[in-house]
Amino acid sequence: MVCAAGGWRGTAAAVSAVGCGEGKQGAPAGSRAGVGGGGGGERPPAVGDHLWTLLVVVVVASGDRQLPRQRRCQEAVQSAAVCRGASDGSAAGAELGFRKGAQRIRSEEAQHDPALPPWFASYDPGAAKSILNNGRTCRVVFDDTFDRSVLRGGPIQGAYRLRQLHFHWGSSDDHGSEHVVDGVKYAAELHMVHWNPKHGNFAPALKQRDGVAIVGVFLKVGKTLKREMKRILEEMESIKTKGKETPFLHFDPSILFPKSRDYWTYEGSFTTPPCEECVTWILLREPIVVSPDQMAKLRSLSMNTENEPFHPLVDNWRPQQPLKGRVVRASFK
């Protein structure tokens, strides 16, 4: 087994190590507006890009040389999502944090907190700016220069500004979500990333315990067509390859919320390097239903640029992390 460590420049660095592209590793178009979160979140390359650490494990045992290229590429995507914890950027350092995400939610262990208030989202459709493929996810970017689209209530204090939303999904319908509930993995997970304006702007907010709030919504595959997803998915052809970005205007993301406002909450981190521990997670209990065709649209994206061989952008989720003494609270019994 050969381990290579280097500066993180996104998934391209990982996939090129296993022959998934031509090695082009420039920041994708639209990266200025990027936001942490994989897990919960997509972190902005513009903030500390040189600090991101890539740990790619390339298996060279003879038996593994025969792995299909697509599988190797998918494994590289997940290997690239290792969190940086120690100052040397080692894999061991990733385990030193105490607020890592994502989590395995066990409903019988979650503590009902009757003091948790309802949460509210007030989004201005005019704040939507663009939609892009950065090689790691499909992202919609919003204007967050003032309080035009905000999240209030729930476990947070004050109004948090919506910066972006993005998705995590799997190569098949039986996995893809970053959080797991009572052993159930969903086909995909939507993250709406908000930040606390009391810290001035997004970059300083990443360094504060109350800097970011992410609303997570599960996507479950069923026969029902989620009409609200149509607007996003019809743009997939325009952002087919990494680096593609197109205007995406007059969109109200609140239409993607389920009817129920029940939620779990815990203190965690982004799920992409360097996994800043600044996130209050608000994970919605009720999934939304999407059709197989709609999931196929997400899986039609490529993790590579248009000048590189096509490799599907799938399995862009991070494995669950230990709670390490934290408590998951529930707004419901």
Image (cartoon, rainbow, N blue to C red):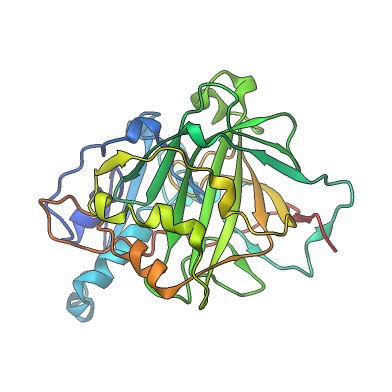
Q: Quadrant of residue 29?
A: top left
x, y percentage for residue 2? Answer: 25, 61
- Viewer-proximal residue, 4 or 118? 118
Q: Is residue 173 above or below residue 330?
A: below
Estimate the x, y position of residue 88 in percent, counting from the top left: 40, 39
Relative to 224, 131 lies left or right: left
In the image, what residue occupies the spot 27% across and 50% down? 239
Q: Nearer the viewer, residue 308 or 89?
A: 308
- Quadrant holding the C terminus: bottom right
* Quarter occupied by residue 206: top right
User: Of 165 and 317, which appears nearest the observer?
Assistant: 165
Residue 101 visible within the image: no
Q: Is residue 157 visible?
A: yes
Where 3 falls versus 219 (above or below)? above
Instruction: Residue lying at the far top in this picture: please name it.
Output: 200
**In percent of the image, x 31 and y 55: which residue is there?**
236
